[in-house]
Image: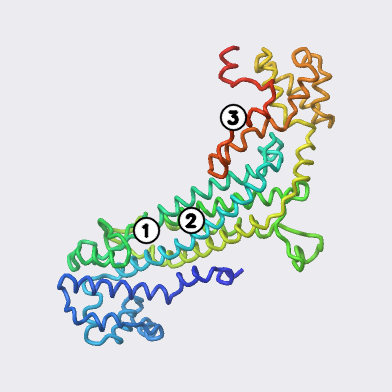
Amino acid sequence: MSIERYSHPDMARVWSNDNKYAKWLAVEIAVCEAWAEIGGIPGDALPAIRQASLDVNRMRHFEERTKHDVTAFLRAVGETVGEAARFIHLGLTSSDVVDTGLSLQIKEASATLEADLAGLRAALERRALEHKDTVMVGRTHGVHAEPTTFGFKLAVWVDEARRHQRRLREAAEQIAYGKISGAVGNHANVPPAVEEITCRRLGLQPAPVSTQVLQRDRHAHYLTTLALIASSLEKFATEIRGLQRTEVHEVEEPFGTQQTGSSAMPHKRNPELAERICGLARVVRGNAITAMEAIPLWHERDISNSSAERLIFPESCLLVDYCLRLMTRLVAELRVFPDRMRRNLESSYGLVYSQRVLLALIEKGLSRDDAYKLVQRNAMRAWDTEQPLLSLLQADQEVTRHLAAEELAGLFDIGYYLKHIDTAFARLGLLEAPQTSSQSSVVSSSEPRSYRQLKTRN
């Protein structure tokens, strides 16, 4: 798979060489303007400098000889300026231009990623509300646990996507810094005022203190944030993959009429979109490790970070952009099968109601240990004999000594498990806060008291 083929045009443009060199030129021009503002260079040099351009082929010609991209860039740009070219790069070192330009690229990339996240969040919110009351079984360790709803599952993802929006904004703020401080960062040849004016013109903050480079914890923070986003996307995709398994088949990826799932088996409809997200997320996490390893540089700097960053920043931004848009499509077009969810819920013989029976027995005065043993004994028989748990409990005299058959049947009420779903949606701002009266209408009269109350009494 060629990621460029699937990349959003805006993100591909951000990480193009043309845009990188345009950012370098913008930095050089802004520095000259700052120098002129403080009287460091003549103002009449600015018109020619502002008209500077870059012939990339000419730059490559120089780079073949200099083996240094910034030197080659300066020579190629200088040819388009004339005598005023002597003021370009005055007092600077290469990293002043490269690091500040990279910050500008990341700022642009962040705008696209923020829009991607907003799109995913909107899709999740829409489907969560759609399936707020779509009942399904909740699973822990992959085993039936207790009833929940598919919308509630998606609401958890909504909350996670919102956290990532905040994380990305913070990481983007931490990297939106420029550095115009010279060879070791001491401003010996370029005063702090030039840095401050330049950064203001570029829409960046000046680094309070730097060496020859911006410190790489900023870059690692950003790429680690992208890795967190990618990891959540893998989490969502893994759940979709699990729910699409033939034995479960509660959801299914969109599948086109001309699409094929296998070269050998015509019946196959595989979760290939989700699997693609899972695979690419691992690449992004690996890049975050590389970014963290670029934090410790020798003395005021070395160049061990540079070669890696030329790969990991474009790749990570392109991949996360792609995976966010792919997940948004997957969520928006996901096929959901409520009837299958209900059948799966009912397939485990009513075992999902075991905790409610346990709590009801405790409410009747049994110790937790004794109540647990009674319920577990019948639950294990239900597993082994494939009989309904309710029938086994109603036939167990030790149980019916405390709970009548009618009481037991009342405990197998799915509404008991769904009574606070609206509260979760209200907390997310997706619904108005539910009324107490409407909540209590689905609660059985035998609802046990809180565990703290029970423990105190026992």
Quarter of the picture containing the C terminus is top right
Q: State the CA–CA distance, disc 2 to disc 1.
A: 13 Å
Mark 1 highlights which residue? Answer: 175
Mark 1 or mark 3, whichever is nearer to me: 3
Question: How is the structure coloured here?
Answer: rainbow
Mark 3 highlights which residue? Answer: 436
Q: Residues within 10 Å of mark 1 (few under 14, many from 20)?
A: many
Q: State the CA–CA distance, disc 2 to disc 3.
A: 41 Å
Q: Is residue 454 above or below residue 87?
A: above
Q: Is residue 241 above or below residue 211?
A: above
Residue at 31 percent across and 70 percent down: it is: 97
Q: Secondary structure at mark 1?
A: helix
Q: Position of residue 71 (x, y in %)?
A: 31, 78
The residue type indicated by label 1 comes to: Ile
The residue type indicated by label 2 comes to: Leu
- Write down the quadrant of residue 172 in the picture: bottom left
Q: Secondary structure at mark 3?
A: helix
Q: Is residue 444 above or below residue 301?
A: above
